[in-house]
Amino acid sequence: MHWLVLILSGAVEAVWATALAASDGFRRPRPTVLFGVSLVLSMVGLAWAMTGLPTGTAYAVWVGIGAVGTVLLAVARREERLGVARAALLLVLVGCVAGLKVVA
């Protein structure tokens, strides 16, 4: 259960990072509210997951999922392009995150 919450919290990290960029320095209300809500949910999930997982592993997995999710959201929104090299590097990152789960 801790792993599931951690994975979901990492996904929500991608939401708050994307909302933070869209908030335009907290001048746009809807992305600002989405940022605040998703930030709290992501942190609460991370904190709870850390009660049953090693801190370093949990944090690395959370950040990795959030980083990959943020890039994929930017690609889906056509704000960034996903070339072969970037896709390969994201796959390596996902592999590292999965590896941390396997050895933890």
Image (spheres, rainbow, N blue to C red):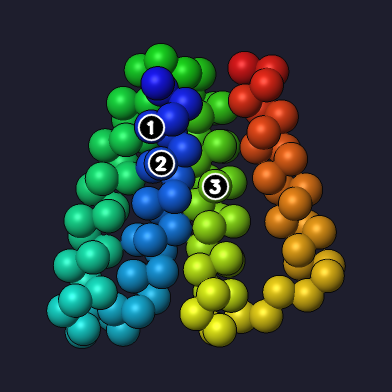
Say which label, 2 or 3, has the lower sequence index: 2
Name the quadrant containing residue 44.
Answer: top left
Mark 1 packing: few (<14 Cα in 10 Å), some, or many (20+)?
A: some
Mark 3 and mark 1 residues within 8 Å of each other at the beta carbon: no
Element on which disc 2 rests: helix
- Taking the image as shown, residue 13 lies to the left or right of residue 96, namely left
Kind of residue sitting beneath label 2 = Leu
Residue hosting label 2 = 8
Kind of residue sitting beneath label 1 = Val
Instruction: From this view, report whether residue 83 is shown above or below residue 64.
Output: below
- Taking the image as shown, residue 79 lies to the left or right of residue 81, namely left
Label 2 to label 3, Cα distance in Å?
9 Å
Residue hosting label 3 = 65
- Taking the image as shown, residue 40 lies to the left or right of residue 12, namely left
x%, y% of residue 52? 41, 15
Kind of residue sitting beneath label 3 = Ile
Element on which disc 1 rests: helix
x%, y% of residue 58? 50, 29
Q: Quadrant of the N terminus?
A: top left
Q: Quadrant of the C terminus?
A: top right
Nearest the eye: 59 or 19: 19
Label 3 to label 1, Cα distance in Å?
12 Å
- Residue at the (75%, 51%) spot, across then down: 91
Q: Is residue 50 visible?
A: no
Label 1 to label 2, Cα distance in Å?
5 Å
Instruction: From this view, report whether residue 55 is shown above or below residue 96.
Output: above
Residue hosting label 1 = 5
Mark 1 and mark 2 residues within 8 Å of each other at the beta carbon: yes
- Taking the image as shown, residue 32 lies to the left or right of residue 73, namely left
x%, y% of residue 16? 35, 61
